[in-house]
Amino acid sequence: MIKFARTRPQTWVCRQCVGQLPRRRSLFWSTPASSATVSTSAGEAAAHNGNDSSSAAAAAAAASSVLRTPVDHAASITHDDTTLREIFDSPTAWAAFKASSSAAHGKKTGLFRNAYLTEPAGFLHFTHASLTKAQRIVDKVARASTLDEYRGIVRDLDRLSDLLCRVIDLCDFVRTTPPDAHTQQAANEAWATTYQYMNQLNTTTVLNDQLGIAMANPDVVSGWSEEERTVADMLKLDFTKSAVNLPQASRDRFVELSQQISEVGTRFVDSMAPADPWVALPSTSCRGLDPTVASRFTRGATLRLPAVSAEAALALRTVQDEDARKKIYYASRTASQASVRLLEQMLGLRSELAQLAGFDSYAHMALRDRMMAKTPESVHQFLLALSRSNAPLVEREVQDLVAAKRYAQPAAQHATEAETTLRLNPWDRDFYMSVLRQAAGAPTGQVDPTTGQRLVPKKRSGPLSHYFSLGTVMQGLSRLFQRLYGLRFVPRETPPGETWHPDVRRLDVVSDTDGHVAVLYCDLFYRGDKSPNPAHFTVRCSREIAPDEIAEAAAADGALSVDNGLTPQDAANDGMATSRDRTTGAVKQLPTIALVCDFARSDGGGGTLSSLFGQASSKSKPALLSYHEVETLFHEMGHAVHSVLARTSLQTVAGTRCATDLAELPSTLMEQFVADPEVLALFARHYETDVPVDYEQVAEGLRRARRFEGLDDENQIVLAMLDQAYHGTTPVGDHSTDMFHGLQRAVMAGGGPVDPSGTCWQGFFGHLFGYGSTYYSYLFDRVLAERVWRVVFQGGQDGGALRRANGEHLRDSLLRHGGGRDPWRCVSDALRDSRLAAGDAAAMALVGSWGTSHRR
């Protein structure tokens, strides 16, 4: 099966980004704090704020003049830095920048500068040209017979994969973020045509057979690079997992099962529903619920809430009546029997598929494919060690919640412990967490619910979002990457047709040593037709372009003809960006990345350059980000910089095409940087006054966000263990509820409250479809990211977060290899810890013992 054509999902909609956003949004990041300040260097402050005594009109004219100058990759960092902020923060500056683009480029170009894609019909021309080249490679591999031909087979298969990915990855993006209906339809047709071709290749074993012959010949393998050997192993495993070696009847059943799993899993996710869609309560029992919410759902004397909804979650946090919360909890944790049956059907099909392919369980099958854990036993050791590490923190947090409940019940306050033992029920957890988090902010000098002591009021310094304009955050990211990796963002004009919407900004990623190394398209503002989920798309991966490909392109006609102004080098990459290595002379296609977010624009919608220089009015704000949105942007940029730095020779292992549980490490690590005071000092300044952010305000928000991190992690550990149990060797049958409740009782004994009998929450666990047996990787990456932060960057102490030597060490030991090197060796070298090198169950247990909490 030509699964290697898409060895990694290129749309990085991260579990952190999607799953954590609702929790982050519930935090009160605008809570006031003290008046401490964070300084920045004089040079950076000058480049950042641009304050002078000139008038707003003069500033606008000067900026417009600068912005009309074509961007040069050799331009000064200060020029790039200033322009970067302006084009994201000022609509006027962005309009001037776009005007300069239109004036300089009269001719329409293709989407992403792909020469085929100047109009919707170009998608089919692009597809036809790519598949024609692909078939020539298939024929070449099938004919291979000499030593040299077998030595080239890995690069041939990698190019075959690249040709298919060029179409599928780009079409995937267009189908998700469509420029218009006609283009979306054309992309759908191109995607379907390419996918059908892949299915045709799946009917033959010739590619697998020829790869097997090459791998069995020592004279062939000895001539391969480390990257080539890694790719050969990966492709061979893909073929094995696709049952290509089975008899025809078994292969047909394998295809049938795969299709059924896809259909049943999709139905499971799309139709997840509670047993009872509504929960009815006497309106008098809902004291504490937001009055606006209560009025929307109250009819007469009855309040009816959707059982699974943001409103029900809010009620669990705020309704004071325990019986009312209990009823809401039961309704929100009880999935319909139809949902549970679909889940159990999917699990049964996966078990049969794994056995057909020769694996002990689906977990054994899935973990062998690009997962660092490799076996279910290793995952078990990691989760067990992590649970032990987390237990003391869970115990303390439960004690705090019980104390808060005791304080809320006057009779219990005066009773001895022997006279009354308060029980923390599942429906108490979110309520008392909310009580204690609000008390931690103490905006009005309220009483501590655990001690009864009056808290000291905190001074206000305004919402944090006022210090995080989108332009300053982008500026800060460029400054951070410049310090760590010698990379900076250079705004680049785009001719008509290159981008899919007028809001899209193109940034060229420029290296101090290697010049132009990547292209980054930023589509960051909210639109009604966009997905609300932040995402990192790799539209095209890094890959070395062979001389014969350039010669082939030089002789091409049509869209890629040199008569159309393309060099043979660019034509070999369909007109998209390429570079030539300054040392070896090798030509590579550059990583082309699209970053999509949904940040709200300013409420004024106008914007002038004067607003950037401390003269803004309330009607001309730039887009202001909440702290969690800044964290999200840093996270997604972690994926992007991984794609940029891992410019491998083979696209199968380029960028984020590495072990799944390694791919989230760079992005999760970036969340550590955004909380560092020296990193924030690079950019976090008030959009009107240019005053630096008060770091204590950030620290206070972080303390409240992490107030119950132990209990949150305990829940994630249980879910990861449940994922393993459901995909393990023990048949689930119709016992998924019993397995879930039994696992909760075993893991959470002495910890947080477990689900009561009568509930069946697993019917809402949609991640079981997309992350079957790999859900543990979320926790795994958090542990590794915190360890890298502490060891490589010294936890930010003494300037460690900005030290070039630290960034270069991480780049050289881990980031630049992509998936072309054993991930355990990468992590072992990065942490300078040889105990990890074996990557066995002991290494997984060691990682688990480090824990995830910032409060240890």
Image (tube, rainbow, N blue to C red):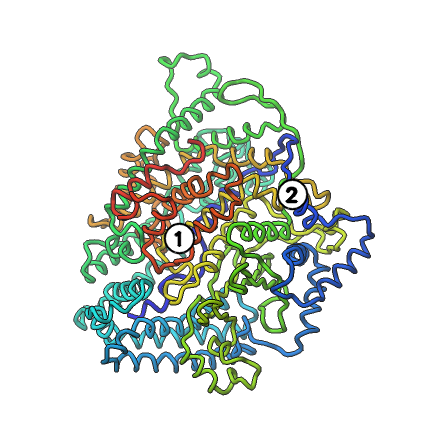
- Can residue 693 be seen from the camera position used here? yes
Residue at position x 54%, y 28% from top?
A: 440
Q: Is residue 168 above or below residue 707?
A: below
Amino acid at circle 2:
Ser
User: Residue 316 shows which numbered tag?
Assistant: none
Residue 29 in the figure: left or right of residue 259: right
How far across and down, in percent of the image, does residue 512 sit? Answer: 55, 59
At mark 1, the secondary structure is: loop
Residue 49 in the figure: left or right of residue 521: right
Q: Nearer the viewer, residue 648 or 74?
A: 74
Amino acid at circle 1:
Leu
Q: Is residue 267 above or below residue 48?
A: below
Q: Nearer the viewer, residue 73 or 122?
A: 73
Residue 539 in the figure: left or right of residue 740: right
Q: CA distance from mark 1 to mark 2?
A: 31 Å
At mark 2, the secondary structure is: loop
Residue at position x 24%, y 68% from top?
A: 221
- Can residue 764 be seen from the camera position used here? no
Q: Quadrant of the C terminus?
A: top left
How far across and down, in percent of the image, does residue 669 sit? Answer: 46, 46
User: Residue 814 shows which numbered tag?
Assistant: 1
**Mark 2 lies on residue:** 41
